[in-house]
Amino acid sequence: MRKQGARALRIDSTEAMLLLLAIALLAFYVLPVAGLLSRADWGSAWEEVRSEKILLALRISLAAATSATLAALLFAFPLAWVLSRRRFPGIGILRALVLLPMVLPPVVGGVALLAAFGSRGLLGGALAAIGIRLPFSFAGATLAAAFVSSPFLVLALETGIASSDRRLEEAAETLGASRWMVLRTITLPAIRPSIVAGLALSWARAIGEFGATITFAGNLPGRTQTMPLAVYEALQTDFDGAILLGLILLLFSLAVLVLMRGRMFRR
């Protein structure tokens, strides 16, 4: 009995230490948010948010993030399917390249996009010849957002496809179902939670993109100035305004996480 009591005490001590460390890290996350809330000038918040410049930046952010996410979905599913269902030499390198934008400094990502799609880039001249100029345009801002956010969608889809029950697909094929019918009626419904979670994470990452956007698309009000860029510009001259804009982005991100909590953290 004494040994069991000592063991229980030891477990309690460990749990107490883990709890204290968890609280410390939680405070590290909460304090910056509390700082924003405490420094916000709520008296002028409504007028600030309603300003034409902010509304325009918000519309550009929403349009660029949504366009980038929907465009990414068209290519992300086939790529995720290949990564999860096929085995070939170099697949590890391919997966690393796909996930590279997740760890690449965003400014470096913007420079890489310029090297690929700029006027002197690998494809820039060919695109310019047919009248397409991506740098310093809304299309460029969308491309930058897609570059940094699409790996989140690919990763979520690959995880969903890999964890789906292939026996159902094989049974359907045995009964004569075509590959397209199997994909439409079995595979896609089975990974719907992964699709929704991937889209939400990708969209949230896209709407908060800064480094690649300002490098590749610039900070042009009314054309490429997204909300993060508006926050950066306001920070130079209007700290209170920057805090309010930051809170808007924070609320968008928090709303996505709250809406997705049931799909991302199932037990």
Image (cartoon, rainbow, N blue to C red):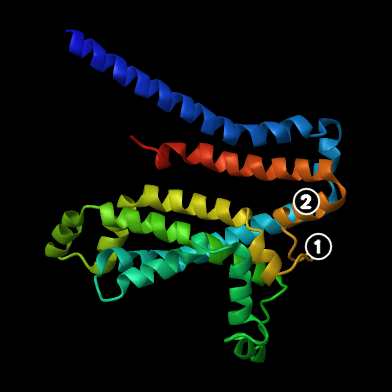
Residue kind at label 1, given as amino acid type: Pro
In the image, is residue 34 above or below residue 137? Answer: above
Q: Quadrant of residue 14?
A: top left
Could you say whether the residue bearing mark 1 is in a helix, strand or loop? loop
| Quadrant of the image containing the N terminus | top left
Tell me if I can see residue 56 in this picture: yes
Task: In this rendered view, identify the residue nearer to me: 22 or 57.
Answer: 22
Residue at the image position 40 percent from the left and 38 percent from the top: 265
Please name the residue shown 40% across and 67% down the image: 96
Q: CA distance from mark 2 to mark 1?
A: 11 Å
In the visual, does 241 lie left or right of 33? right
Question: In front: 138, or 182?
Answer: 138
Q: Position of residue 139 (x, y in %)?
A: 65, 71
In-image side of 128 versus 176 (left or right): right
Q: Observer-nearest residue: 9 or 40?
A: 9
Location of residue 90 with respect to 46 vertically, above or below: below
Residue 138 in view in this figure: no
Residue at the spot of label 1 = 221
Label 2: state its secondary structure: helix
Q: Earlier in the sequence, mark 2 or mark 1?
A: 2
Mark 1 is surrounded, within 10 Å at the Cα level, by few (under 14), some (14 to 19) or many (20 or more) other residues, namely some
- Horizontal and vertical percent position of residue 251: 64, 39
In the picture of the structure, the residue carrying the numbered disc 2 is 55
Q: Position of residue 197 (x, y in %)?
A: 44, 48
> Image quadrant for the C terminus?
top left
Q: Amino acid at mark 2?
A: Leu
Task: Give the farthest residue toward the left.
Answer: 174
Residue 174 in percent (x, y) is at 12, 63
Based on the displayed image, in which of its 4 quarters is residue 19 positioned? top left
Disc 2 versus disc 1: nearer the observer: 1
* 14 sits left or right of 232 in the view: left
Residue 157 placement: quadrant: bottom left
